[in-house]
Every structure is written in structure tokens, then in C-alpha cells.
Image: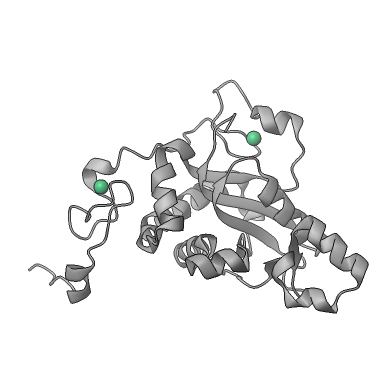
Amino acid sequence: MQTPTPVLDLFFPRRCPVCDRPVKPYGALICRECEQVPVPVGDSVCCKCGKPVDPEEEYCADCMTHRHRYYRGAAVFRYRTVSGSLYRFKYDGRREYADFFGLEMARAAERFFAQTGPGHRPDLLIPVPCSKKRLRERGYNQAAILARQVSRKTGIPVAEDLLIRAKDTLVMRTLSASERQNNLKKGFLVYGNGVRLKSIMLIDDIYTTGATIDACAGALLEAGAKEVSFLTFAIGENGL
Ligand SMILES: [Zn+2]
Ligand SMILES: [Zn+2]
């Protein structure tokens, strides 16, 4: 017997993250014919940031010359193959893509945990916060939506209010001038003691130079986090 189509779906059929048309077949998260479009990072990735590298290379050019604050990171797809999809997810209100993004990210997370070993499984997922201004414009933080999806599938809890953009917060009013200056420079602030001795995985939609992830990791480590890793849906290749 066929499951009846929920009424809402008749008016707002789920759209495919690749072609943006109603998904075929009904009930899938991506069209069968679109499945091959997003190209996974593959097996040969940088041991630090997870960018695709040539098989004989251990680290990407960036990680060979630059010291990152985080422990390690992983991503699912090569950015150029999912850029249109990510754009619509962030700016065109296509929140429904998060079901596909989140499922793929959760799978990538489990592969990553298998590689890094049980000692590195995170205690907490933390989305990279977006500014209040962007939140107002868009109505949602895409990283938080992804973090909720990954949490649902991996069972690792998500904390959305521990890491904040320094400029946005009212907490800033309670700090001294020098503390405030310091926080503004770093861009991110950890609220309370929730990350102490915890292993954290940052969640974002894309990793390019690593500047944002490093800034978040720095703030978390200074607030007492034991270790910070990251997981993103897309990752740039070298030179991007
Ligand atoms: Zn499609
Ligand atoms: Zn790297």
C-alpha cells in the first residue's frame, strides 16, 4: 500500500538540493539523477583540515605552512560541486536541503570518528554563530540547522548558545574596556563554563581558509575546551 502524500507536500513538495525541482522519486532527499553531481572529498585528504590532496601528500599546502588551532577537521563535498546548492540554502531560504546535508554530514562524522578513535569522539557539537544582523536578514543560522541534524543522527548533543559573536553580545557590556577590546579582536566569545574539559566539534557549512574555525577554536580552547575539531558540508580545494 502506498503511503498517502501529506497535504503540505502537495503545496510545498520537497526540492532537490541539486536541481531545485521537486525531488524524484517522491520521498527521497535528492533526485536519483542528481546524486552524482556533488563530488565527495574522496579518500585522499589532508590529515589536518580534510581538503582533497594528491594521494602521495599527507598535508595540503596551507596546513604545511600554517599552524591551525583546531585538532583536525572533515568535510563531505568539494565546494565547487555544491556551491549553487549552498547558496540557495543560505540565501534563498531552502532550509529543507538540511535533511540531505545533515544526513551526509552525519555519515562523514562517523567515518571521521572511526579514523580518529574513541578518545576523540566529541562531547558536544557547536555551530559557528552568525551575526545578529545576518540572523535578522535570513531568519536562521545555517550552521545551527546543520548542527541539529548531525546531532539527531549521531546522538551527540548540540549547544547553540555557548559560542557567540563578540560584537553581538550584551555580555560585552559587563566587561572591562580591555576585555572588550580583546574579545572584539578575536571575534568570538564563550559564554559560561559549558565547554570546560569538553571535546567540541564545530559545525559550519563551508571551510575555506580556516580563519573562522581557528578563531572559534581559539576562543573555545581559551575557555578550557579539551579539544576542538570541525565538520563542514563543503570544503574548498587548494587555492580556493
Ligand atoms: Zn534533482
Ligand atoms: Zn590542510
Can residue 138 be seen in the rendering of this structure? yes
Relative vertical location of residue 180 with respect to residue 51 in this rendering, above or below = below
Relative vertical location of residue 126 with respect to residue 115 in this rendering, above or below = below
Residue 223 on image: x %, y %? 80, 65
What is the quadrant of the N terminus in the image? bottom left
55 to the left or right of 17: right
Q: Residue at x 61, y 49 (%)?
A: 117
Give the number of callouts. Answer: 0
Residue 77 on image: x %, y %? 45, 41
Quadrant in which residue 56 is drawn: top right
111 to the left or right of 190: left
What is the quadrant of the C terminus in the image? top right
Quadrant in which residue 102 is drawn: bottom left
Quadrant in which residue 83 is drawn: top left
Can residue 155 be seen in the rendering of this structure? no
> Which residue is outermost to the top?
56
